[in-house]
Image: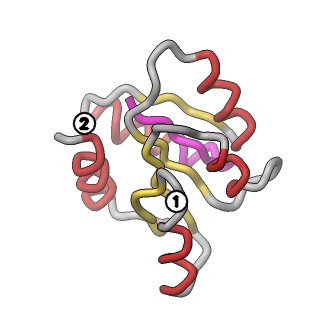
């Protein structure tokens, strides 16, 4: 199960379509970090991976990441970051990768398969 957290509905729907229909994954959608935390509290099974946009309204993403335990996180971002900043972000707990939007569908699927062990 993959959770997609992005304030852009088109991004959420696109990823859901790719993962659910083309790759046979189950996805859960959240519109921001606070929505993500609320949904995580109510799930009986944790997602295998969270795809998390880094620029969203509400609670800062860094604070959201601090509250998530034992779930891998891959950042999604349309914002360019330096290699130094990227390494810093990847050093946060649970953060396993960084995907630049617009993303390549094949690269996204490859990352997910790598992170969920398929």
Between circles 1 and 2, the one closer to the viewer is 1
Please, which residue is most extreme toward the left here? 118
Which residue is located at x 54 percent, y 61 percent? 92
Q: What whole-number distance in Å separates the C-alpha atoms at marks 1 and 2?
A: 19 Å
How many numbered marks does the figure carry? 2
Relative to 91, 60 lies left or right: right
Up the image or down, 24 lies above or below 55; here it is: above
Q: Name the residue under label 1.
A: 76
Which residue is located at x 62 percent, y 47 percent? 6
Please, which residue is most extreme toward the top here? 44
Up the image or down, 107 lies above or below 19; here it is: below
Q: Quadrant of residue 88?
A: bottom right
Q: Which residues lie in the magenta part?
A: 1-12
* Residue 112 horizontal/vertical position (percent): 30, 48
Which residue is located at x 69 percent, y 61 percent? 55
* Residue 5 horizontal/vertical position (percent): 59, 43
Up the image or down, 116 lies above or below 45; here it is: below
Nearer the observer, 101 or 81: 81
Q: How many residues crowd mark 2 within 10 Å: few (<14), some (14–19), many (20+)?
A: few
* Residue 77 horizontal/vertical position (percent): 56, 65
Q: Mark 2 points at which residue?
A: 23
């Amino acid at each position: 199960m993959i959770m997609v957290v992005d304030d852009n509905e088109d991004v959420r729907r696109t990823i859901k379509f790719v993962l659910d229909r083309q790759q046979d994954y189950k996805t859960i959608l959240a519109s921001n970090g606070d929505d993500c935390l609320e949904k995580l509290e109510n799930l009986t099974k944790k997602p295998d991976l969270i795809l998390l946009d880094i620029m969203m309204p509400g609670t800062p993403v860094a604070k959201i990441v601090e509250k998530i335990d034992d779930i891998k996180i891959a950042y999604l971002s349309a914002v360019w970051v330096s290699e130094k900043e990227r390494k810093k972000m990847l050093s946060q707990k649970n953060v396993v990768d960084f995907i630049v939007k617009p993303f390549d569908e094949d690269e996204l699927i490859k990352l997910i398969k790598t992170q969920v062990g398929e």
